[in-house]
């Protein structure tokens, strides 16, 4: 790759980062420090945020993550730090907004069917090689995104994750900021695409050659539950994304939404029935990727297995 091409790609990635932040209608540069106290002063926080921006402009994912992680994990964490953390980890997924939109609108498959899975492996490829951390980074990004919660929301009831950390997150769409719900669908797709690529082993036509391995509830703990969680978080956030989409992009999202609304609920219900359990659609808390305990008596594990069975049935094979 020539220096000029590398520079162009770096600028594209940084512009992608800026566009997502603008779409979120969330201006964070001058946010006040957390009321929980601060182990970093304001100058250090701003320096770290600036370093994230510089690192992302150079596609230096490691430096971006290293620059913001100490603050994210401290009592000094706040909205701009959480958003920067989400984007720093997203760097490893190679997500670029313009490229994604172009791929979405040019895709010839039928989004009202299992062609969604083919699209995801096209856009978010991944392998099981040691240096490929696309899935793991997408999950870390999602964790940071979920912590972008609206001010004043009480941390009570179900639907909260990471409560014992400086960055508790909400599984409830309405409790999260626009910045979260704008960025979440892309990282949920990155998570799904990476897992589909690694375990579905698509061929050159992006058709599945191996069945996903999480079709039994006892196999769902970990990646199987993460796939189900990402699917549901993606579906939730599609509603928010549709509001700001162009006609052509919105048409694609609408087809995907229709397919997933029907397919995921039916899959979860079937998964529960196969265990002799009862659930009407997908359990809400399955949005928590750690919820499955991997037994035939666990409703979350059974529902997650149902979602993997849906993919194996609908994703076109060779």
Image (spheres, rainbow, N blue to C red):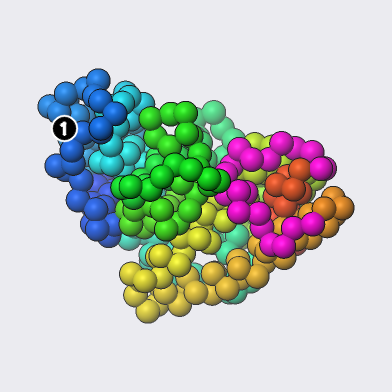
Q: Residue at x 24, y 47 (%)?
A: 14
Q: Quadrant of the C terminus?
A: bottom right
Q: Residue at x 36, y 57 (%)?
A: 182
Q: Residues within 10 Å of mark 1 (few under 14, many from 20)?
A: some
Measured from the top left, where is residue 225 in percent x and y? 65, 44
Helix, strand or loop at disc 1? helix
The verdict on residue 285 being magenta is: yes
The verdict on residue 117 being magenta is: no
- Vertical side of 270 occupied by 251: above or below: below
User: In the visual, does 25 lie left or right of 285?
Assistant: left
Measured from the top left, where is residue 118 in percent x and y? 59, 61
Q: Which residue is mark 1?
A: 46
Measured from the top left, where is residue 142 in percent x and y? 45, 44
Q: How many marks?
A: 1
Magenta range is 278-297
Nearest the camera: 18 or 107? 18
Using the rendered image of the protein, determine whether residue 269 is visible from the camera's viewpoint: yes
Measured from the top left, where is residue 203 in percent x and y? 64, 54
- Main secondary-structure element of the magenta-colored stretch: loop
């Amino acid at each position: 790759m020539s220096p000029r091409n590398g520079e162009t790609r770096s600028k594209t990635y940084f512009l992608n980062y800026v566009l997502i932040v603008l779409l979120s209608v969330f201006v964070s540069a001058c946010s006040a420090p957390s009321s929980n106290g601060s182990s970093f002063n304001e100058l250090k926080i701003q320096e770290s945020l600036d370093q994230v921006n510089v690192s992302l402009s150079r596609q230096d994912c490691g430096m971006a993550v290293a620059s913001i992680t100490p603050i994210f994990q401290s009592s000094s964490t706040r909205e701009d730090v959480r958003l920067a953390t989400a984007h720093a980890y997203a760097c490893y997924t190679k997500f670029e907004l313009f490229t994604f939109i172009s791929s979405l609108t040019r895709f010839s498959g039928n989004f009202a069917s299992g062609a969604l899975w083919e699209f995801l492996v096209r856009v978010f490829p991944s392998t099981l090689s040691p240096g490929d951390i696309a899935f793991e980074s997408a999950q870390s990004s999602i964790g940071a995104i979920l912590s972008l919660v609206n001010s004043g929301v009480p941390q009570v009831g179900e639907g909260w994750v990471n409560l014992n950390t400086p960055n508790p997150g909400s599984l409830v769409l309405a409790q999260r900021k626009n910045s979260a719900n704008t960025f979440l669908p892309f990282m949920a797709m990155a998570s799904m695409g990476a897992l589909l690529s690694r375990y579905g082993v698509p061929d050159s036509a992006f058709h599945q050659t191996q069945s996903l391995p999480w079709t039994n509830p006892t196999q769902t703990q970990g990646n199987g539950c993460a796939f189900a969680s990402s699917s549901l978080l993606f579906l939730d956030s599609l509603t928010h994304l549709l509001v700001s989409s162009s006609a052509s992009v919105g048409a694609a999202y609408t087809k995907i939404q229709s397919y997933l609304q029907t397919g995921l609920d039916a899959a979860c219900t079937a998964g529960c029935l196969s265990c002799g359990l009862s659930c009407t659609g997908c359990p809400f808390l399955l949005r928590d990727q750690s919820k499955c305990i991997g037994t035939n008596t666990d409703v979350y594990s059974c529902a997650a297995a149902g979602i993997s069975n849906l993919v194996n049935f609908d994703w076109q094979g060779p």
